[in-house]
Image: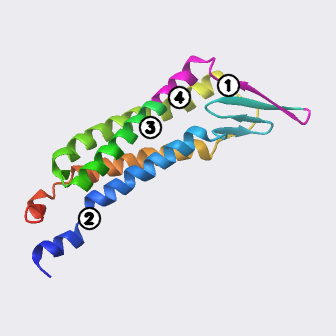
Amino acid sequence: MSVNELYACERPFKPIALLCVFLALCLDVAALVSPAWVTAEGYALSLWESCTDNTAVWTCVSTLTSDWQIATLVLLLSGASVTLLCFLVAVISLCRGTNRKHYRTVAVFLFTAVVLQTCALVLYPIKFIEYRMLHTYHEFNWGYGLGWGATIFMLGGGILLCLRTDMYEDGMY
């Protein structure tokens, strides 16, 4: 086994970063379509609709009438779009062998997506508590957690793409 083969086996940062970005994209899509962002007894709120239980019949109305909910949705959709673009560029770059040219750019865009997602995920509970004070116990559910999971994987992918391994990879490419 040569030295170059040894480094290729020990330092798979770019494929792991690509996996992180793919997982972030999957978690983001799951968070966007999730019906459970906030739940309480007889109440459920998602990004798209708010449902209440009135005498054993669930009544749902659109949440796209509130400015803060639209802003949250736009920020999350923007972050997911940037993540999709990053994933496609990283896959093409890795497959074509032009990987060193585009990784830093992809990382910068991933950090932009992290900022967008974080703004949305901080805005959502602040405005929810301000405008929708429930008189019962409520909790942020798995849809909200998936959003944070996607953000963490985006951040991890961006950091891995920023790692400078070109001094080890020069002999391989």
User: Mark 4 or 2 closer to N-term?
Assistant: 2
Q: CA distance from mark 4 to mark 2?
A: 34 Å
In the picture shown, does residue 91 fall above or below 37? below
Which region of the structure is painted magenta?
A: 55-75
- 38 and 91: which one is in front? 91
Residue at horizontal 32 percent and vertical 41 percent from the top = 110
Circles 1, 3 touching at the beta carbon (< 8 Å): no
Q: Which mark is residue 73?
A: 4
Amino acid carrying label 3: it is Ala
Q: Quadrant of residue 112?
A: top left
Which numbered disc, 4 or 1, marks the residue that appears first in the sequence?
4
Residue named by callout 3: 80
Task: State which quarter of the image contains the C terminus.
Answer: bottom left
**Disc 3 versus disc 4: distance between alpha carbons?**
10 Å
Label 3, residues with CA under 10 Å away: few <14, some 14-19, many ≥20: many
Three-letter residue code for mark 1 = Arg
Say few, some or many: other residues with alpha carbon within 10 Å of mark 4 (under 14 / 14 to 19 / 20 or more): many
State the residue lying farthest toward the front: 96
At mark 3, the secondary structure is: helix
State the residue position of label 2: 12
Residue 96 falls left or right of residue 171? right
Q: CA distance from mark 1 to mark 2?
A: 47 Å
Camera-near label (3 vs 4) is: 3
Q: Amino acid at mark 2?
A: Pro
Instruction: Identify the residue at image location x=38%, y=54%.
Output: 20
Q: CA distance from mark 1 to mark 3?
A: 26 Å
Along the line of sight, the residue nearer the viewer: 102 or 67: 102
Q: What separation in Å lies between label 4 and label 1 (alpha carbons)?
A: 17 Å
Q: Is residue 130 left or right of residue 83?
A: right
> What residue sits right under mark 1 in the picture?
132
Secondary structure of the residue carrying tag 1 is loop
